[in-house]
Image (cartoon, grey):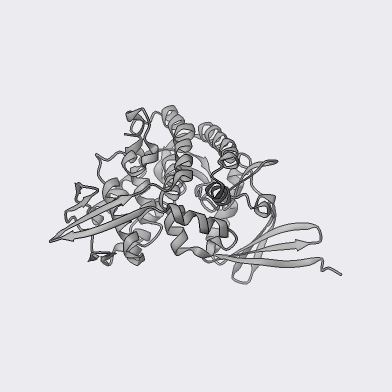
Amino acid sequence: MKSLLRLWHHRRYTRNHTWYLDIGQRRLFVKASPNADEARQELAGRDMIADIYRVPALHRTGRAGAWTVHVYERSPHVADGLLLVDAIARAEATQNLTLLDRFLDDILVHYRTTILATARCIPGDQAVGKLYRHRAAPGGRLDEYYAARTPWPLPTGPWWPDGTEIFVNGTRRRPGLPQIIETLRSEIGTSALAWAAVTQGDPTDFNLAWSSSDGPVWFDYDTAGLNAIAGEFACFLMYQLLHGPRLTLRYDKAAFRDHPEALHHALSGRPAAHAERAGRTIALTYEAGPGPVRTHILQRYLTELMLPVAETVGVRDLSAWLRPYLLMRLLGVYNVTTLEPDDAALTLALAADLSDDATSIATVFPSLRTSSAEAVR
């Protein structure tokens, strides 16, 4: 006789733990968090977006000792393996974009409609702060990672980005990390007016899902709410460029436990970097192309979402708008001082390019080049 109660499929994500729970015919998803504040924010974020984004129903929430436990209905999207990470893997394996394009058709229309319907200009410190403002603030993640001035482990030897001249793909740059951090604090950590909209806030390959019957669904809500639009875009862009095809694969392999096809096929499309030292000068060369499938995603994201939204809210310089948020996603997710030397070199090259006001984001994201040069200046 089969048990009517089954707790299985345990997974760990950072400090949180999840399980599948079957009670008779009912299929549930259990998430346990040791951080009560983040658990409360997840509920608040879910409540804020639930009327305009499809999210799984919340069955119950409660405490189990030091842990906060949320129990959701288990979305069929999870069981069917239709997270964005899986749609990308299938496209890479088959060279067939049909399924991925159906996914993008629905999700980009929903994003564009919802962002434009909820967009408003607000003081920046009223937007959700977790991924940007809090990390840039004194004592936040940027200080945690870089205040000790630990040298970055480049292939040419340890080096601290302090303004020393380097060449990136043949162009002279002078990246000063302390100056970059102070600039980020002044541009992100203030009450200056910024365009925001109601979004999930962390649009990675693992948080977006789709099915042909139910359309798109969103997971993970502790960043959900009124988010800076440029931050929402930067998160997606940097994940498609660097995190998804390279860093997550290398440093968070456990995330792919249920997605082995994604782990296998994405390895062929990783961005690459090379470093040479001549005296006091470092020459970095990099190719940031994330592969044809993710390039296709980036092109559609630009033309069907970013440009229409930017035009509607009156943003004329897309590069300037996105730059601080892209730098935060580059420096504030992984601690560069703990990366392998080739990844540190790639991060330095990207940071040097992005921190130069003269750089168009099309320099860093070749797939965002369009026939209209002004669109991505």
State the residue at coordinates (54%, 31%).
117
The image quadrant that residue 139 belongs to is: bottom left
For the image shown, how many numbered marks are present on the structure? 0
Q: Name the side, left or right, on which 275 lies relative to 279.
A: right
State the residue at coordinates (24%, 56%).
178
Q: Looking at the picture, how far across and down is residue 325, in whole percent? A: 37, 46
Along the line of sight, the residue nearer the viewer: 352 or 363: 363
Q: Looking at the picture, how far across and down is residue 157, in whole percent? A: 23, 67
Q: Name the side, left or right, on which 12 lies relative to 281.
A: right
| Quadrant of the rendering where the C terminus is positioned | top left
Q: Looking at the picture, how far across and down is residue 34, in whole percent? A: 56, 67
Residue lying at the far bottom of the rendered structure: 65
| Quadrant of the rendering where the N terminus is positioned | bottom right
State the residue at coordinates (35%, 65%).
340
Along the line of sight, the residue nearer the viewer: 308 or 313: 308
The image quadrant that residue 364 belongs to is: top left
